[in-house]
Image (tube, rainbow, N blue to C red):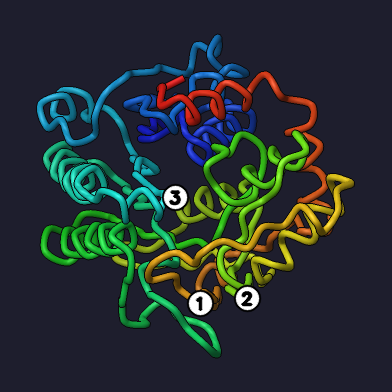
């Protein structure tokens, strides 16, 4: 199979590419990534010399590029996205351009090329917030942040191409990911790297907001399963089954880093901060999905990776502090 992976130099996309090439001899992968601040060629370093990998720096909203590129690929997995909620609140245009316009351009290119399968990688944030219980795959979309709204729009476009044009599109919606090579703007790597440097960690509000946490390896296993077995026009929840409040996560990271509770700094809450996310994952379970990494082992292992790989994350934090790109 020849597979096109968009956003393949990012945190989740690169994990998917590395795992795919390591586990499947008969696959060839084309990665398209614009290499914005969140895309990092170092994420693909372990496989850059693999002759089955082709890397193209490009924008998924570039229809002309996609028209030339997509033919010959049996499947597309779309990881490409602007994904940081705080950035979407500060400025939403890039989120509309990539998450909506880019997804639309990919869907059109896939339709015209006769692509056999298309997996749209989405998020639980499209549902908004839920106080009790869990969302199922047909729960109404009710996004609160510009980021979530653009992902919801892309999901609806994807489903429309399945229903109107017969394109074989499946959608995955996942909870919060963690693991190696996650950009340090996100909560877990930000807190880990701050703690490793002896710095305080900024906890939004009272820290009671609850999220589903899943290791990136488990997420990528799920996406691979949906790519292979997912039904056209269907949504699959990637539920890690490990709900934790932000304060619980903070306390676990503090313990894993050998720091103390005095490092926590409560800061003003984020505008429109969703209180709780929770996914029911029966559809994916029916395909045989079982998460393999529990936070009890996953969090300490992630801390250890950041402790051993300062050369990966220190330049990113310097760039963020100075307004640079690297």
**Residue under the point 12% across and 58% down:** 165
Outermost residue toward the right in this view: 258
Front tag of 3 and 2: 2
Q: Mark 2 points at which residue?
A: 208
Binning the other alpha carbons within 10 Å of mark 1 as few (below 14), some (14 to 19) or many (20 upward) gives some
Residue designated by label 1: 275
User: Which numbered disc, 1 or 2, marks the residue that appears first in the sequence?
Assistant: 2
Residue drawn at point x = 35 percent, y = 40 percent = 80
Local SS, label 3: helix
Element type at marker 2? Answer: loop
Q: Are marks 1 and 2 in contact (CB under 8 Å)?
A: yes
Q: In this rendered view, identify the residue nearer to me: 55 or 302.
A: 302
From the image, tell me which residue sits under label 3: 227
x and y percent of residue 183 in the render? 54, 37
146 displayed left or right of 298: left
Judge the density around disc 2: few (<14), some (14-19), many (≥20) Cα neighbours within 10 Å.
some
């Amino acid at each position: 199979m020849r597979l096109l992976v968009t956003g393949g130099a990012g945190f989740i996309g690169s994990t998917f590419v590395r795992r795919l090439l390591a586990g499947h001899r008969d696959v060839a992968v084309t990665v398209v990534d614009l290499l914005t601040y969140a895309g990092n060629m170092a994420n693909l370093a372990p496989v850059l010399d693999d002759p089955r990998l082709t890397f193209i720096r490009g924008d998924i909203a570039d229809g002309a590029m996609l028209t030339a590129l997509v033919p010959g690929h049996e499947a597309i997995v779309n990881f490409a996205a602007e994904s940081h909620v705080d950035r979407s609140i500060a400025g939403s245009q890039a989120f509309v351009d990539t998450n909506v316009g880019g997804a639309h351009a990919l869907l059109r290119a896939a339709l015209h090329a006769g692509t056999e399968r298309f997996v749209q990688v989405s998020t639980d944030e499209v549902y908004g917030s839920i106080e009790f219980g869990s969302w199922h795959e047909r729960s109404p979309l009710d996004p609160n942040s510009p980021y979530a709204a653009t992902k919801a729009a892309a999901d609806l476009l994807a489903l429309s191409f399945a229903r109107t044009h017969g394109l074989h599109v499946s959608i995955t919606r996942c909870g919060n990911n963690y693991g190696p090579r996650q950009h340090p703007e996100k909560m877990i790597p930000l807190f880990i790297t701050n703690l490793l440097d002896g710095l305080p960690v900024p906890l939004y509000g009272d820290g009671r907001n609850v999220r589903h946490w899943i290791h990136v390896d488990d997420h990528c296993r799920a996406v691979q399963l949906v790519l292979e077995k997912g039904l056209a026009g269907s949504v699959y929840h990637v539920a890690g089954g490990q709900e934790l409040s932000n304060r619980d996560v903070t306390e676990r990271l503090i313990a894993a880093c050998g720091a103390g509770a005095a490092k926590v700094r409560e800061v003003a809450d984020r505008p429109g901060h969703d209180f709780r996310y929770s996914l029911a994952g029966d559809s994916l379970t029916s395909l045989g999905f079982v998460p393999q990494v529990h936070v009890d082992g996953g969090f300490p292992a992630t801390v250890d990776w950041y402790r051993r790989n300062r050369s990966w994350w220190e330049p990113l934090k310097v760039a963020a502090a100075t307004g640079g790109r690297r």
